[in-house]
Amino acid sequence: MLNIPLWNRIVIWGLVALGLAFAMPNLFYPRVERHNDAAAAIEAGLSSEEAEADLAAWPSFLPSTLVNLGLDLRGGAHLLAQVNVEDVYVARLDALWPSVRDALRDERETVGTIRRQDSAPGELRVRISQPDGMTSALEAVRTLSRPVSNLTGVGASTLDVRADGDEVVVTLSEAERTATDDRTMRQSVEIVRRRVDEVGTREPTIQRQGQDRILIQVPGIGSAEELKRLIGTTARLTFHPVTGRGGSGLQPESREIVLPDIEDDSLYYRLEQTPVLSGEDLSDAQPAFNQNGQPTVNFTLTTSGSRAFCEYSQNNVGAPFAIVLDEEVLSAPTIREAICGGSGQISGNFTVETSTELAVLLRAGALPAEMTFLEERTVGPELGADSIAAGETAAVVAGIAVLLFMGLSYGLFGLFANVALIVNVVLIFGLLSLIGATLTLPGIAGIVLTIGMAVDANVLIFERIREELKTAKGPSRAIELGYEKARSAIYDANITTFITAVILYMMGSGPVRGFAITLGLGIVTSVFTALFVTRLLIVMWFERRRPKTIEV
């Protein structure tokens, strides 16, 4: 006999009510979006009358999570960037030179004088005056090597050290290069994410693609150029000792660089190539104003950075040093006294916007390597609105077609299936809102496909009930057997499709993942509505009417 316990009914209707509650904010998208923005602003201490009004526009006791609209629906910018990981090898070996120099100086009696030589990128070459001491030199430099901090490089060392005539050649080992590539990509993705999050964009897509590429999609931003300005700048802040200054003809000595002044194109500085401090020694940066009311950026050093700068300034009172940002000298003041406070100020020809942008970049950290943009695309909001309208039209047409088919084919039972289909769509949007998923145009295609697939389970059940009715069983028994015998076929068909959705999500990216998410969620909700919601509707109708015969 048909029987569904009371607690089962409560659970089923409870889940449907929760799905409706979480899906409902999407019917009032602009209002709820303003409410969420106001809540975030007030939490950050930026309260205002307008924010208070927007916050009160949506009841606080109702869910306020929304289905985030993807780039193709909201409009925004798309970038595909390639990270030049080889730059990190050069920086690593350049930073290693002082340690190599000190290690060889300890062996001066054996190796003689030492001098760094020009070398190919990714190599550090040091010439010794006494080639007979090469063995001691190699052993001294090899003490600087460390085990590779990567599971794939267990047992390997970070450095390869070899002799080439009277030169010691130091390179990163293959295992260390692999580990460095992975760290560089992870760091680049995280820094890009910080920079994008700082400007308050909604649900950006920032993910690694392949070995050395990053996909960046930011809905709601004005253009790809604006996004490139935000994330394409390395914002590398360094402090260098100044060895000379002059015009455009200024030539660097060995291990020196020549950089222009940021304001005076005719002024150049000759600096030591290895910096005293870098952006990694910064702990914070904030926009501010100096005593003349001009925009500046105040920065704070880390404990180790503060200690290093204090020691350097103590030993170089009276000497100039340069503050360099992205290979341009911001200023080159003279050290009047030891600077041990751990903070400073960057001044220049800033506006309020540029000082704020620089503070954001410095706070997020410098990109470990330069990025080359291979692909850039701007999607206008009008195109996004057209995509939403097209998706809505497709969903409505598909829904009406399915509703008519089920109603004409199965009569009253088809109407029950139609109610379950509407509940199914509500549950999909409720789950998308609950997990904070991003809806893309392929995601809408997944929902439209789910609408068509959602009735498959009901078709199997209804056809099975028809067959049971032909064996002269009563309507109650026929309905019960119809559900029992169709259940295994429903599970088999939907499990295989769900596995496909999981594989698409794991192996795909961007729009493919959007399609996989809506398809996977649609499979779960369609099985739930077919086996539980439709059956509960039929049982409730059967208990009320008690028909002697039924037609499916």
Image (cartoon, helix red, strand yellow):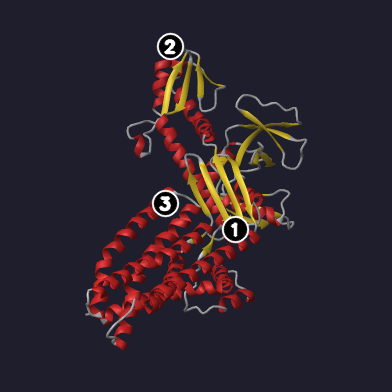
Label 1 is placed on what type of residue?
Answer: Val
Q: In this view of the protein, can residue 210 be seen by the observer?
A: yes
Q: In this view of the protein, can residue 3 be seen by the observer?
A: no
The residue located at (65%, 36%) in the rendering is 319
Q: Quadrant of residue 240?
A: top right
User: Can you give x and y, in whole percent of width and height, for residue 299 in the image?
Assistant: 60, 51
Looking at the rendering, in which quadrant would you find the N terminus? bottom left
Along the line of sight, the residue nearer the viewer: 203 or 383: 383
The mark closer to the camera, 2 or 1, is: 1
| Secondary-structure class at tag 1 | loop
Label 2 is placed on what type of residue?
Answer: Asp
Label 3 is placed on what type of residue?
Answer: Leu
Q: Which residue is mark 2?
A: 132
User: Does residue 266 appear to the left or right of 133 in the view shown?
Assistant: right
| Secondary-structure class at tag 2 | helix
User: Can you give x and y, in whole percent of width and height, for residue 502 in the image?
Assistant: 38, 54
Along the line of sight, the residue nearer the viewer: 297 or 78: 78
Q: Are the residues tagged 1 and 3 within 8 Å (C-beta)?
A: no
Q: Calculate the distance from the C-alpha at mark 3 to the C-alpha at mark 2.
A: 61 Å
Along the line of sight, the residue nearer the viewer: 464 or 279: 464
Q: Quadrant of residue 145?
A: top left
Q: Which residue is mark 1?
A: 199
Of pointers 1 and 3, the one earlier in the residue sequence: 1
10 Å crowding of disc 3: few (<14), some (14-19), many (20+): some
User: Can you give x and y, in whole percent of width and height, for residue 2 in the image?
Assistant: 24, 79
Of pointers 2 and 1, the one earlier in the residue sequence: 2
User: Does residue 246 appear to the left or right of 39 in the view shown?
Assistant: right
Q: Which residue is mark 3?
A: 504
**Placement of 465 over or under 499, stated as above or below:** below
Q: Calculate the distance from the C-alpha at mark 2 to the C-alpha at mark 1.
A: 60 Å
10 Å crowding of disc 1: few (<14), some (14-19), many (20+): few
Q: Quadrant of residue 51?
A: bottom right
